[in-house]
Image (cartoon, rainbow, N blue to C red):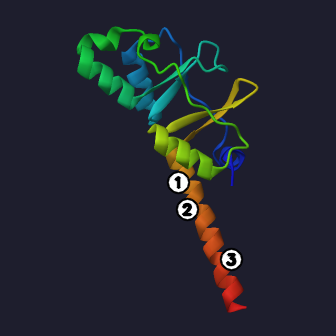
C-alpha cells in the first residue's frame, strides 16, 4: 500500500497557515481543526514550512508568553520532510520513526496534493495486516 491509497481514503485536503499569522492564531487554528500540525504556505500550494503543537510548546518553553505574538514564520520548521504519492507505507513508517516526525506533506511537482499523519499510516498498515490475515485464514480453510 502506498501514500496514494491513503489519500484516496482520507482525501487531499491540507490545512495551512500563512507565514504572517501569529503563533496564537496558529494555536487557535490547530485547536479548531483538531489537528497536530499545519503546513505553512504563503500561496496554499507550496510548502514554506510546517508547525506542530510540539514546535509551539518548545518555543513557548524557551520564550514564554511573548512567543504567542511572534509570526509563525519565525518558529516554523523550514526543512520540511515530504513524500510522494508513490511512496510505500513501510518507507513512511521508517522515515517518521527515524526523523521523529508525525506529519508529511505529499508533493507532486513541488505542489502540495495532500498530507499524511502517523495516525493515517498506522490505520492503513493495520488495515493491510488485517487483509493479509483474512487472506491467510481463507487459504488455510479451503
Mark 1 crowdedness (10 Å alpha carbons): few <14, some 14-19, many ≥20: few
Which residue appears at 47% of the width and 12% of the height?
Answer: 73
Q: Is residue 101 visible?
A: no
Separation (CA) of disc 3 from disc 1: 20 Å
Q: Which residue is mark 3?
A: 135
Residue 132, by quadrant, is: bottom right
124 up-or-down from 11: above or below: below
Query: Are dots 1 and 2 in contact, CB under 8 Å?
Result: yes
Residue at screen point 63% across, 63% down: 128
User: Along the line of sight, which residue is nearer the eye, 14 or 60?
Assistant: 60
Counting from the top left corner in percent of width and height, residue 70 is at: 37, 9
Could you say whether the residue bearing mark 3 is in a helix, strand or loop? helix
- Percent position (x, y) of residue 78? 51, 19
Residue 13: x %, y % from top left: 63, 33
Q: Looking at the image, is 87 positioned above or below residue 62?
A: below
Which element carries disc 1, helix, strand or loop? Answer: helix
**Residue 40 appears in the rendering:** yes
User: In the orientation shown, which residue stands out farthest toward the bottom?
Assistant: 142
Q: Which residue is mark 1?
A: 122
Residues at marks 3 and 2 touching, judged by CB atoms closer than 8 Å? no
Sequence order check, earlier mark of 3 and 1: 1
User: Disc 2 marks which residue?
Assistant: 126
Amino acid at each position: 500500500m502506498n501514500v496514494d491509497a491513503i489519500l484516496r481514503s482520507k482525501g487531499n485536503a491540507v490545512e495551512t497557515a500563512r507565514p504572517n499569522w501569529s503563533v496564537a492564531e496558529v494555536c487557535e487554528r490547530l485547536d479548531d481543526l483538531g489537528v497536530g500540525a499545519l503546513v505553512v504556505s504563503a500561496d496554499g500550494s507550496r510548502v514554506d514550512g510546517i508547525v506542530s503543537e510540539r514546535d509551539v510548546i518548545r518555543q513557548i518553553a524557551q520564550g514564554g508568553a511573548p512567543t504567542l505574538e511572534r509570526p509563525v514564520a519565525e518558529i516554523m520548521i523550514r526543512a520540511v520532510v515530504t513524500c510522494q504519492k508513490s511512496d510505500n507505507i513501510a518507507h513512511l513508517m521508517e522515515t517518521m520513526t527515524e526523523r521523529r516526525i508525525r506529519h508529511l506533506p505529499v508533493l507532486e511537482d513541488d505542489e502540495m496534493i495532500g498530507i499524511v499523519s502517523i495516525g493515517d499510516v498506522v490505520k492503513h498498515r493495520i488495515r493491510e495486516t488485517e487483509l493479509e490475515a483474512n487472506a491467510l485464514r481463507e487459504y488455510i480453510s479451503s
